[in-house]
């Protein structure tokens, strides 16, 4: 018997509506893959993806809380430098970087989870040798057990034990170091609790260093602390944190113990977003010549606006920051050093780190094809905070001594094109130039740096 076409249409529409009603929102593919939750696929989703069969594999029939998820990513980067380190290295160098990550996530029960991740980071072409952050042939970047009290987002306590990535706030202090070829990981215990508008984080870890071999990454130093989070309104958040980092200085120069206390306020409203963060640092450096006290500080902020209902969704924003530096003749160490800052602190050119640096950034973006094509143009402007101190790289290594009385370090404009053809693929083309200023000319060489890169990534 043939059913009337109108009845068939009603049945199909009802099935689609039922599927959409049962579906839950699913996460985006995140840089921190351990933060994804694919339990949403227990009832399907409105926009299915070809990778979904790997994201939700139930192993207890009829039970949503028991499943395994697999994923991974690959990133290929080709970059070219002219006059890297302002001419202190090879006149020109190029590098091809590869990074591969695979992970498995087992939801053993509604309250217990095991997550593991392997990484392989390779480099070829850079002269004279690869940087320490470029190569890690094979290692386990994450392997932890997570216990959950309730599994709810608004009232929960989660404890992770094992090797894991750790990020706090905006990543100015503690980040996973996504920009470089290898990431920063920690061994230890991390607890995160949420009760309504309140949140508390606590952690005790041993930082893991990068080594180029196979399963040979050593551990060094100690890191521990906590953070209090308050979200009184959906568009406003407060954070207060305190942590301690202890580490050995390179070349046997002693021990560095820093205690950092700070706070952050951030939020958004009708296209406007803002972020203000400040921190102080005390401690002691113990060296062969004696002990020196530490008293350092930093202040940073961001303000930007996006016109979402305008063609291209244009945005205009600014960031600024001041990081203290040592003063000539002072016995106190006054240079602030974040314990685990973002790897690309001032863009992918990574010529300069935060130590003893003041400056601001202007940035504008445009999306001619929303979701597919984004254009950005920005510029950094740098000065020395203290003329009694030199310049430093992102991890805190000195790159120029304190010579002369000039403050202006230089400026760094850059242009970028980002293409995102689908939720799995991203292609970025970027060009940047660092114009050397008087500080660098007082401590030569002081050649302008040219940097170009094409970066392609695929994740599933």
Image (cartoon, rainbow, N blue to C red):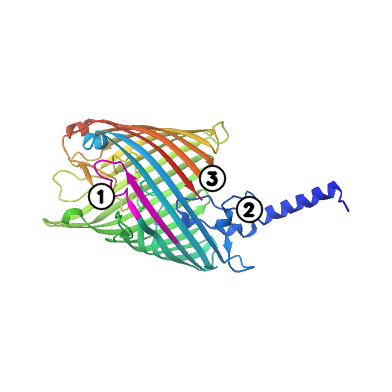
Where does label 3 land, which residue? 423
Disc 1, disc 3: CB below 8 Å? no
Q: Is mark 2 on a helix, strand or loop?
A: loop
Residue 321 lies in the magenta-colored region: no
Residue 123 lies in the magenta-colored region: yes
Disc 2, disc 3: CB below 8 Å? no
Where does label 2 land, which residue? 45
Given residues 27 and 3, the one toward you in this image is: 3
Q: Can residue 407 be seen in this view?
A: no
Q: Which of marks 2 and 3 is nearer the N terminus?
A: 2
User: In the image, which residues are magenta?
Assistant: 116-137
**Image quadrant assignment for residue 379:** top left
Comparing labels 1 and 3, the label whose residue is closer to the camera: 3
Q: Is residue 142 visible?
A: yes
Q: Which of marks 1 and 3 is nearer the N terminus?
A: 1
Q: Is mark 3 on a helix, strand or loop?
A: loop
Numbered label attached to residue 296: 1
Q: Is residue 147 left or right of residue 12?
A: left
Q: Is mark 1 on a helix, strand or loop?
A: strand
Q: Is residue 9 left or right of residue 223?
A: right
Question: How far across and how far down the image is residue 92, in percent?
Answer: 27, 34
């Amino acid at each position: 018997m043939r059913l009337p076409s109108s009845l068939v249409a009603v049945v199909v529409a009802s099935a689609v509506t039922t599927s959409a009603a049962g579906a839950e929102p699913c996460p985006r593919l995140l840089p921190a893959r351990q933060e994804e939750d694919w339990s949403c696929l227990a009832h399907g989703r409105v926009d299915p993806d070809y990778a979904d069969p790997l994201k939700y594999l139930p192993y207890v029939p009829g039970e949503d809380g028991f499943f395994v998820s697999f994923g991974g990513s690959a990133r290929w980067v080709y970059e070219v430098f002219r006059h890297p380190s302002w001419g202190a290295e090879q006149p020109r160098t190029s590098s091809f970087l590869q990074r591969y990550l695979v992970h498995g996530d087992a939801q053993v029960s509604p309250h217990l989870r095991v997550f593991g991740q392997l990484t392989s980071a390779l480099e070829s072409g850079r002269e004279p040798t690869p940087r320490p952050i470029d190569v890690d042939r094979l290692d386990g970047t994450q392997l932890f057990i997570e216990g959950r009290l309730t599994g709810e987002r608004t009232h929960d306590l989660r404890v992770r034990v094992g090797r894991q990535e750790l990020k706090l706030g905006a990543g100015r202090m503690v980040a996973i170091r996504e920009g470089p070829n290898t990431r920063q990981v920690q061994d230890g215990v991390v607890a995160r609790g949420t009760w309504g508008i309140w949140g508390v984080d606590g952690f005790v870890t041993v930082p893991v260093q990068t080594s180029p071999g196979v399963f040979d990454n050593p551990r060094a130093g100690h890191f521990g602390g906590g953070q209090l989070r308050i979200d009184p309104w959906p568009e406003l958040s407060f954070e207060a944190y305190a942590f301690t980092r202890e580490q050995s200085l390179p070349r046997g120069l002693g021990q560095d113990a820093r205690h950092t206390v700070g706070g952050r306020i951030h939020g958004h409203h009708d296209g406007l977003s803002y972020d203000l963060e400040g921190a102080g640092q005390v401690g002691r450096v113990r060296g062969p010549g004696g002990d020196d006290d530490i008293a350092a500080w930093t202040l940073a902020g961001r303000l930007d606006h996006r016109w979402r209902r305008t063609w291209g969704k244009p945005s205009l924003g600014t960031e600024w920051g001041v990081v203290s530096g040592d003063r000539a003749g002072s016995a106190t160490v006054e240079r602030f050093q974040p314990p685990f800052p973002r790897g690309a602190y001032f863009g992918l050119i990574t010529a300069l780190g935060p130590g003893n640096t003041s400056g601001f950034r202007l940035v504008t973006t445009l999306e001619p094809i929303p979701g597919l094509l984004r254009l950005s143009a920005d510029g950094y402007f740098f000065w020395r905070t203290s003329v009694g101190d030199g310049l430093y790289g992102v991890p805190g290594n000195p790159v120029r001594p304190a010579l002369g009385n000039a403050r202006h370090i230089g400026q760094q404009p850059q242009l970028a094109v980002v293409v995102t053809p689908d939720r799995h693929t991203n292609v970025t083309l970027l060009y940047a130039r660092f114009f050397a200023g008087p500080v660098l000319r007082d401590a030569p060489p002081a050649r302008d740096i040219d940097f170009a890169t094409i970066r392609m990534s695929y994740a599933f």
